[in-house]
Image: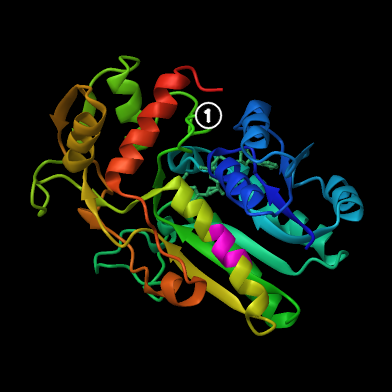
Amino acid sequence: MGRVLVTGGAGYIGSHVMVVLGRKGYRCVCLDNFSNSSPRAVERAQVLAPGAIEAVEADIRDTEALRRVLAGADISSVIHLAGLKAVGESVEKPALYRDNNVRGTQCLLEALAGSGVRTFVFSSSATVYGNATAMPIGEDAPTAPASPYGENKLEIERMLAKLAGEDPSWRVASLRYFNPVGAHESGTIGEHPSGTPNNLMPYVCQAAAGLRGPLRVFGTDYPTPDGTGIRDYIHVMDLAEGHMAALTALPLTPPGTVMTVNLGTGMGHSVLEVVDTFERVNGVKVPRELAGRRPGDVPICYADCSRARQLLRWSSRRTLEDMCRDAWRWQVLNPAGY
Ligand SMILES: NC(=O)c1ccc[n+]([C@@H]2O[C@H](COP(=O)([O-])OP(=O)(O)OC[C@H]3O[C@@H](n4cnc5c(N)ncnc54)[C@H](O)[C@@H]3O)[C@@H](O)[C@H]2O)c1
C-alpha cells in the first residue's frame, strides 16, 4: 500500500485524518504551507501515530514542489484538504480565495497528471447547498452556494467530476462536511481558530474559559423547539474516520467513479442544546446573551446520511456529549492553541 498525500494535513481536520489513518496502518505525507496552522500540530499527530506521518512544507500552487514530492514519496492516493475556509473573508477577498482554493486544486491536479495517482478524496462542504429549506439535505438537493467560498467548493467538485468523466482511470469522492467540532480524545490536537471564532463550539470553549465575552445566541424565535437555530454537528474523529472509509471504498468502485457524499450525523442540535450540554458534561458555565437573528442564517440544517452508510459503510458514532467533552479537554490543555 502506497502513501496518502494529505494536503492541508496540519490543519484542524487534516491532523485528525492523519492520526486515524496512521493508527490503521496507512502512511501519510502531510503537505501544508502552514498559512493557517502550526508545524506543532503535525508533531503532535506524529506522536499519536508513531512512524506514520512525514511532513513537507509546500504550497499546493507550487506545481514543481508537488511534482518533486510525488516523484520521491510512493504516493497512491490523495486527500485534499488544503484551502482557505472563512466564509466572511471569502466575501471580502474573493480573488484570494479563488487563487488559493480553485487554482490551487488545478495545480495539484496538474502535478498528479504526470504521476500514477488517480484516487482522490476532496474536502467539500455543506455550504454548497446554500440556504436550503427542505430537510434533511440529500446530496441531490439543489446547490446554491451563498459565498465565494461555497462557490469555490462547487467549482472544484465539478472540476473533479469532469476530470473523471474524461479519464475514467480516476476515482473521486467529494465529501460534503456539515459542522465538524470536538478534538482527539487525548486533548493534544484540536481546533484553534485565529482571532474571534466564527463557529459555535470554539466560541463556547473560549467563552467558558473566560477568554471571550458572553456567547451571543443569534436568533431565539426560529420555528424550532427552543427557538434557536439547529445544525448537524459531527465529531471531528467521526469525520476523520469517514475519510478512511472513502479511501477504503474508492478502489472497489468501477473506474471513473465520482461519489458525492454528505458527512454529518443526520441529527440536528440547537444552539441552546449545545451550550446546555457543554455546561452539564464539563461542569462549567458558558456566559451567554440572547441576540436577534443574523441575516442569511437558516432555522434548521441537517444531513441525510444514507448515502454515506450505503457507499462508505460509515456512519458517525460519537454523541453531542463526546463532542463537548473533547472540545473542552483540548481547550483546557491548550488555552493558547499550539
Ligand atoms: N472546519 C469546517 O467547519 C469545515 C467545513 C466544511 C469543509 N471544510 C473544509 O475542510 C478543509 C480543512 O478544513 P479545516 O477546518 O481543517 O481548516 P484549516 O484551516 O485548519 O486547515 C486547512 C489547512 O490547509 C492549509 N493550506 C491552506 N492553503 C494552502 C495552500 N495553498 N497550500 C498548502 N496548504 C494550504 C492551511 O495552512 C491549513 O493547515 C478545508 O478545505 C475546508 O474548506 C471545513
Give x and y (percent) for residue 86: 48, 40
> With respect to residue 110, does 49 lie above or below?
above
Give x and y (percent) for residue 166: 73, 81
The residue tagged 1 is 188
Among the 4 quarters of the image, the one containing residue 10? top right
Magenta range is 243-247
Q: Which of the image's four quarters has the C terminus?
A: top right
Q: Report if residue 152 lies within the magenta region.
A: no
Q: Which of the image's four quarters has the N terminus?
A: bottom right
x 45%, y 20%: residue: 333
Q: Is residue 131 left or right of residue 116?
A: left
Q: Nearer the viewer, residue 119 or 218?
A: 119
Q: Is residue 166 left or right of residue 21?
A: right
Type of colouring: rainbow
x 28%, y 45%: residue: 320
- From this viewpoint, is residue 221 visible? yes
Among the 4 quarters of the image, the one containing residue 167? bottom right
Does dot 1 land on a helix, a strand or a loop?
loop
x 58%, y 60%: residue: 244
Ligand 1 within 8 Å of disc 1? The answer is: no
Q: Nearer the viewer, residue 30 or 248?
A: 248
- From this viewpoint, is residue 148 visible? no
x 39%, y 54%: residue: 178
Q: Report if residue 246 lies within the magenta region.
A: yes
> With respect to residue 281, does 76 lie above or below?
below
Q: What is the tally of numbered marks visible in this picture? A: 1
Give x and y (percent) for residue 292: 15, 36
Q: Is residue 193 left or right of residue 59?
A: left
> Local crowd at mark 1 within 10 Å, few (<14), some, or many (≥20)?
some
Q: Amino acid at mark 1?
A: Thr
Q: Quadrant of ligand 1?
A: top right
Give x and y (percent) for residue 235: 40, 47
